[in-house]
Amino acid sequence: MTDEEWKQTWAVYEAACQLPAPKRPEFVRASLSAGVARDKAFELLADLDADEAPAAPLVQPAAEIAGRRAGKALGRFQLLSLIGRGGMGEVYRAFDPDLNRFVAVKCMAPTSLGAGAVESLIREARAASALNHPGIVTVHEVIRTGDTVAIVMEQVEGHALRTLCGQPQPVERVMSWGQQIAAALAGSHAGGIVHRDIKPENLILRNDGFVKVLDFGLAARRTNAVASDQARPAGTLRYMSPEQARGASITPATDIFSLGIVLYELSAGIHPFAAEALASNSTLAVPGAIAAAEFRGPIVNGRALPEEFEGLLTAMLEGEPAARPSALEVSTLLSAMIETRRAAALPTNRFRTRRLVVTAAVLLGSLGAGLWLWQSVRTAMRVSPQLRAVQGTLLTGSAGREGSAIFSPDSQAIAYAWDGGEGGKRDIYVKRLAGGDPVRITHSPQDEWNPSWSPDGRRIVFLRQGAGLYQVVVVPAVGGSEQVAGTIEQSMTNLSDRLTWPGDADEVVVSDDVRGLRLGMCLFAIQLRTGQRRQLSQTGTDSADVAPRASPDRRWIAFIRVRRSEDEIRIVPAGGGDSRVVAKGAGIRAFAWKGSGAILYGTGSAGFKEPWMADIVSGGAARTAYALETGISEVDISPDGTRLAYVKKVRDSNIWQVFAGGAPSRRVAISTRADEDASYSPDGQKIAFSSDRSGQFEIWTASAKGANPRRLTALGGYSASPAWSPDSRRVAFDSTAGGLSQVWVVGEDESRPVALTRGMEGIVPSWSHDGQWIYFSSRTTGRNELWRVAAAGGTPVQLSRDGGFESRESTDGRYLYHSKPGTNGIWRMSLSDPGTSAKVADFDAAVQFRCWDATAAGLIIASPGDRPVLRLFPPSGGPGTAIARLTQELPRFGRCLSAHPDGRSFLYSVDDVDHQEIYLADTP
């Protein structure tokens, strides 16, 4: 449809809306000749009829009505009863005998079986099936039988939010629903998909209070080009965004506007643009006001809403798309509001209540300062007005994990790592910005990342996972024969950017940890021809030099010095010399050169929302540069300074339980945030885990089935590695609260956490069988060794002399089983004669070295692969026996396995949502 056809269609539609409903079809037929314009006018009228009709639930579990297909078979599916009907067809409750489960089957209406309708159905299936999020209805398959086309999807027991509109709902419930919907949309947007039809009918509230988003029939994938069907609006008039109603380009902000309408309608009991409808006799008053972006502020219908909630809704209903918060921001802000209200309602424990209120207030305050400015009731939250907002578009629009994006020296291509949309290991790809498909230049079965271009742009160096080491590999930029230039020590953290290519064509720079020396991670230059090294930086055991980046003129190398307190960005001449500090800040994890005279970087939880620019020539104070999105983990600026590439990450990890003997796996402690590092209590009744549900990673507990989750800590740092005491009453863990990672202990009675390794680094704690000692790992001597400290407090004592990381004491207290950094195996050390250890089990070379646990029966170790196998190894050494199979690949970092005391079930973490996508934008 051309712009002229659309204008004509809209004019006829507006005129038809002024007529009584029965006369509208005749008027349209008389005004428009047969064709796409007339078809679109009838489509708009159908939407209007649906809006004007009395609200009816999409799902009717209490009184299902009989459909003409009920009782019949459709392929292998037995259609049982009709549970919903719409303009596009009918939805049936059905049974799948092959998988022994109930499903929902959406059948296309016979009158809708034109090419466009079938295409819409297929598009819905593809869009939804490309997403893997607990808040999005799962699509199983598309079936065609005879003249019937249908989608098979998960069955949702509940009712549409439409049934709750018209009366104000409790604010706490609306906040919870909104947080869940926004989290689902964040996953959708991270997958490059905009829903475009968020309305109460498409939001199903399950009987357990969980909300599901369905009907991706209008969804569109967002790429650099605007799709042709975005030249006209698609969606439901009363819930369209202004740009959608005008037929302008569609971005994720469209869904935010629609969600804002839904949440306002649920909260206030009235549509936010209803004032225009009440003051006008025109049926188009509401969509007309939306198209003109005439939102005049909150309408509370005689009921006050919380000020911060009204501010968020007003921001979501901004007329300008760039002024609206992202789905991830909406989800995060609502989580903080919910936490604040919950804390205020818990007066029974003064310390806990004060701690929760302060923590939530700090979270809201930090978000408000770094993301959105909380203002008065009728003032929207905005990005700092002096900053220009930068909004990128997808580089490829591919599913899966993209990352490590870096521009070529001529600024015309980007090299990056991608998992092919299948999860697991990544390969190196090159995408020319002028067009064309990405080109895969590596084909190894091992994980690859961190590409960097040679000065002439003809070669690329990158890292490849090896057996306990990272290989430094060089390959032609168009693919071909490879050269392994050397190896570096494996990293124990997600600070995995470890190399760059400065000005010398035969020399690359890496960040490496030198074994046996009392040094932290330092920078070294490696000669590609000889493998010889020269050291470029030197630091102590309390810091690490990582993420080297050569300047565009190849004269300087910038890097991050990660410290216990405040991190630094330093620069050193590529030829060698002293380094100097150019920027400081807490939590610096990525940066980019802006030309060869400035550096763009992000700090703390705000990250790159409002990044800083440091001028390394003048040495003046850093300034905020411009406004980006949240969730950005990596950035790069083209050498010519005209383009910005950034990587957005959305992750939802959950804890799963797998059973020996083949019983189906299940999720426990379900949330839309990152839950990981789970550990069974010795009595088997509880679990402890690390989660960012409250904004930062803290220690939580729940029942063994995941019920009644409860936060134990509010330290403000990164808290992880929980380990239960033998009596199942206390939890030891490590936390970076205060800057230095230390071992802490907290009781289940919510007593104040106590740091045991005061002033000394300590990580990954475990308990002795009698509860008297806590074992941990520390780099105090220059490398990770095993130590122990009295659980009641005292002076730590070193145990190992040949390396040690994560440990478990044997049930009889005679031995300490442990792993070592950068190696694939389990060692056993006698506690009566500590010092050296003997190897008793081998890992596969590709396995994550924290995927193991110890039980009374022996050692449990997970193999690598898409569906890892758990094997039981004898405690004194010998071959292993397969006892269970996991459903998904294990994470690359963090502890990922815990055995139940009875040895019949196991906890592990899975990234149910792990999207990373590269966006491209023009620099301001």
Image: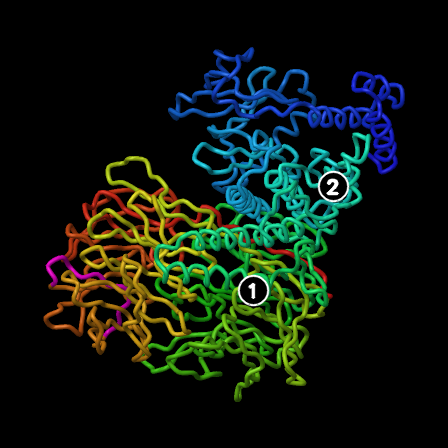
Quadrant (top left/top right/bottom left/bottom right) for the C terminus: bottom right
The quadrant in which residue 323 appears is bottom right
Magenta stretch, main secondary structure, is loop
- 421 drawn magenta: no
Amino acid type of the residue that numbered disc 2 sits on in the rendered structure? Gln
Residue 76 is situated, as x and y percent measured from the top left of the image, at 46, 19
Point out the residue furthest to the bottom here: 578
773 horizontally vs 34: left or right: left
Disc sitting over residue 244 in the figure: 2
Q: Does dot 1 land on a helix, a strand or a loop?
A: loop
- The residue shown at (53%, 33%) is 204
- N-terminal of the pair, mark 2 or mark 1, is 2
Residue 513 to residue 483: above or below: below
Residue 479 to residue 151: above or below: below
The quadrant in which residue 775 appears is bottom left
Residue 266 is situated, as x and y percent measured from the top left of the image, at 59, 38
Residue 331 to residue 609: above or below: above
Give the extent of the magenta segment.
802-813
711 horizontally vs 367: left or right: left
User: Residue 923 versus residue 720: which sits nearer the camera?
Assistant: 720
Q: Residues within 10 Å of mark 1 (few under 14, many from 20)?
A: some
Which residue is disc 1 drawn over?
A: 606
Looking at the rendered structure, the number of numbered marks drawn on it comes to 2
Residue 300 is situated, as x and y percent measured from the top left of the image, at 65, 43
Amino acid type of the residue that numbered disc 1 sits on in the rendered structure? Ala
Residue 732 is situated, as x and y percent measured from the top left of the image, at 28, 63
